[in-house]
Amino acid sequence: MTVRTRRPIQLMSWLSAAFFLLTASMASSQSLSVQPLNLVGTIPSTDWEAYRSRFVEDNGRVVDTANGNISHSEGQGYGLLLALAAADRRSFERIWNFTFTELLIRDDGLAVWKWDPNGKPKVTDRNNATDGDLLIAYALAKAGTAWQEPRYTTAAQKLAKAIGGSTFGRSGRSMILLPGAQGFGASDRPDGPVINLSYWVFEAFPVLATLAPEYEWNRVWRDGVMLLLQATSGRIRLPADWISLHNELQPQPADGFPPEFGYNSLRIPLYLLRAGMTDMEWLRALKQRWSAENEGIAVVNVVTGQIRERLTDQGYAILPAALACALDGTPVPESLKTFEPSLYYPSTLYLLAKSLLGEKYPQCV
């Protein structure tokens, strides 16, 4: 009898806590709004030229120098966004031409994610990567408005409709963004659906909602915030890069992926800042964690809390500096004010952060 009475009480307590967390998360997400960025002219031409000369080929291919010199839809999207931020229309057009010709070859209107210069054929994986699609569509939409170029707006709208039609899904009561059109849904894998919270490029959602209003963009980004709050509610308070929603009440690290807050997820706070979503308590907790007196920015096992790798590149170091600036007005250290490009990914993060700081927080730089 004792066992029978204790288990329902424990279960009810757990369910009550889960319900409280869900309710609080929904309330928090509903109170947030995305603040638009102007983008154009927020990156100095010298910084953009240093990036362009190292990572963008003359044909518009953006090269991932730490990943076998491949190109991917994410990199093309970042390249478009940074070219726009640098007000370099010529480079934007080149990057878009390569993207349109080499990656936008799927029947559903999404971009293939991987292009390998040594591959035969060069497109070695025809699945899409939804963050890349979002970045490309968002950059095209912003460029279409900034430069009054209907071609870009039309292409952005076509891609936005493809994203909504092929990558929006449901998990319980949540609307979710699938990382790819294939391979991540509930019918694709035993622990599905699987998501990656760093694929929510929050600043893009309101812009693309105006181009494809038949899809629930507002619901998807708000539920993404709710899922982030749930995924960071545990002892470690960090989301895994790849998350299973098979258990609808609590996100878990997905099978087959390291249970780590890693190179993917460290973009999440930057995306939140770029969207103007600074009033999340988790950001303050992360700022404290990333401070020099504590852990610093690192790849962390979200189950054990063990640090696998500390990240010291300038492109990673600017992320906690941007957090401190946005939340507390702390000036960016002098050592981070001069761009020193290294590898594609941290250099990209650096310019995305610097673009934000230049537009929204010039007093810090």
Image (tube, rainbow, N blue to C red):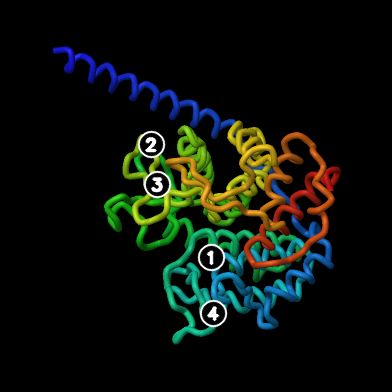
Q: Earlier in the sequence, mark 2 or mark 1?
A: 1
Image point (54%, 79%), residue name: 102
- Mark-to-mark CA distance, 2 and 1: 35 Å
Q: Nearer the viewer, mark 2 or mark 4?
A: 2
| Callout 3 touching callout 1 (CB < 8 Å) | no
What label sits on residue 102 in the rendered view?
4
What label sits on residue 158 in the rendered view?
1
Q: Nearer the viewer, mark 4 or mark 3?
A: 3
Q: Which residue is mark 3?
A: 253
Instruction: Evaluate whether residue 325 shows in this view.
Output: yes
Q: Nearer the viewer, mark 3 or mark 1?
A: 3
- Mark-to-mark CA distance, 4 and 3: 33 Å
Could you say whether the residue bearing mark 1 is in a helix, strand or loop?
Answer: helix
Q: Earlier in the sequence, mark 4 or mark 3?
A: 4
Could you say whether the residue bearing mark 4 is in a helix, strand or loop?
Answer: helix
- Mark-to-mark CA distance, 1 and 4: 17 Å
What label sits on residue 288 in the rendered view?
none
Q: Earlier in the sequence, mark 3 or mark 1?
A: 1
Q: Residue 305, how many percent across, how many down?
A: 49, 41
- Mark-to-mark CA distance, 2 and 4: 39 Å
Q: Dot 2: few (<14), some (14–19), or many (≥20) neighbours within 10 Å?
A: some
